[in-house]
Amino acid sequence: MSSRNKEQQDYKVPGLERGLAILTLFDQHTRALSASEIARRLNLPRSTVYRIVVTLESLGFLELNSANHEYSLGRGVLRLGFEYLASLEMVDLCQPILYRLAETIGFPVNLAILDERSVVYVARALVPNSLTGAMNVGSRLPAHATTVGRLLLSDYSLEQLRELYPEETLEASSVNTPKTVEALYELISASKSQDALIGESYFEDGYTSVAAVVRDKTGQIVSVISAIIPSSSLDETQRDFLKTQVASSAQELSARLK
């Protein structure tokens, strides 16, 4: 054994190694497993597996279905995946698309992902002399209060939204912000069939957001391309033009991720 291999063996953390082994059991063919089945597949004691899955569940990497006592991957895994894409492939692939879109429409554009209850902006493209619409990379906004967030939450069921927002009343950012989970779900449901979505003053009064979802090869929503524009700058023809351009750019990025 080489000195490097010996060093790796000496410094391995068995619990972490087993936890990661459990996470890798799940894929598109294996979406849920009981603790006993996990123990069988990994040839580990049930007590050991139980301690690990409880820890992974508490950290958001696994979710437990109390009806059948089976575990599935949690949003923590998705969050890591989103951050990885944002730091590597997706940002590299999106930047030329964002620049071209910004030049075409004459307004700054952004790319955002979902992190639990927040929209996180991971890329942007600016245009000369623009004073609005460009979010700093790393900026966070409440998902429920933004058009971008509504699109990122499009695949959530009402039950999943209630788990994400257990409070009775949602914090309002403007007069158009949905006040309850049910109101948020109605807004999301009404926009699911649209290629691109226009939102009026959901987060900040006086601004219009034009946004469209980006999907990966599995069809899962991974990000949203958007532009934020002063509402006074737009007539109906311009709105249609913006929707077409933003939707086309989102479709192009989706195709590149497949």
Image (spheres, rainbow, N blue to C red):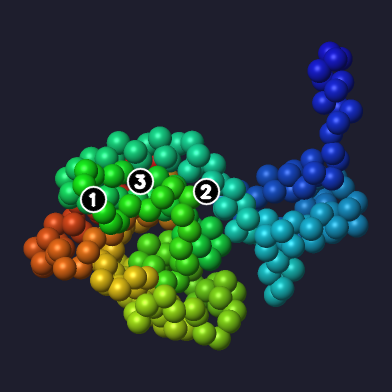
Q: Position of residue 209 (x, y in %)?
A: 28, 63
Write the residue at 89% across / 28% down: 10
Q: What x and y, as percent, mark residue 116?
A: 56, 62
The disc, 3 or 2, on the residue closer to the chain's N-terminal end is 2
Picture disc at residue 82: 2
Q: Position of 254 compared to 137: left or right?
A: left
Q: Amino acid at mark 3?
A: Arg
Residue at 50 percent across and 62 percent down: it is 118
Query: Which residue is painted at 53% across and 58% down in the image?
Result: 115
The residue that disc 1 covers is: 130
Per the rendering, the mark at residue 124 is 3
Quadrant of the frame with the C terminus: top left
160 left or right, relative to 124: right
Image location of residue 138, percent across then percent down: 48, 50
Foreground: 249 or 206? Answer: 206
Label 3 crowd bin: few (<14), some (14–19), many (20+), radius 10 Å: many
Which of pointers 2 and 1 lies earlier in the amino acid sequence? Answer: 2
Q: Which label sits in the foreground, 3 or 2?
A: 3
Q: Is residue 214 visible?
A: no
Q: Earlier in the sequence, mark 1 or mark 3?
A: 3
Q: Amino acid at mark 1?
A: Ser
Secondary structure of the residue carrying numbered label 3: strand
User: What's the CA distance linking mark 2 and mark 1?
Assistant: 29 Å
Residue at disc 1, secondary structure: loop
Q: Is residue 95 above or below residue 225?
A: above
Whole-angstrom CA distance, mark 3 to mark 2, is: 16 Å
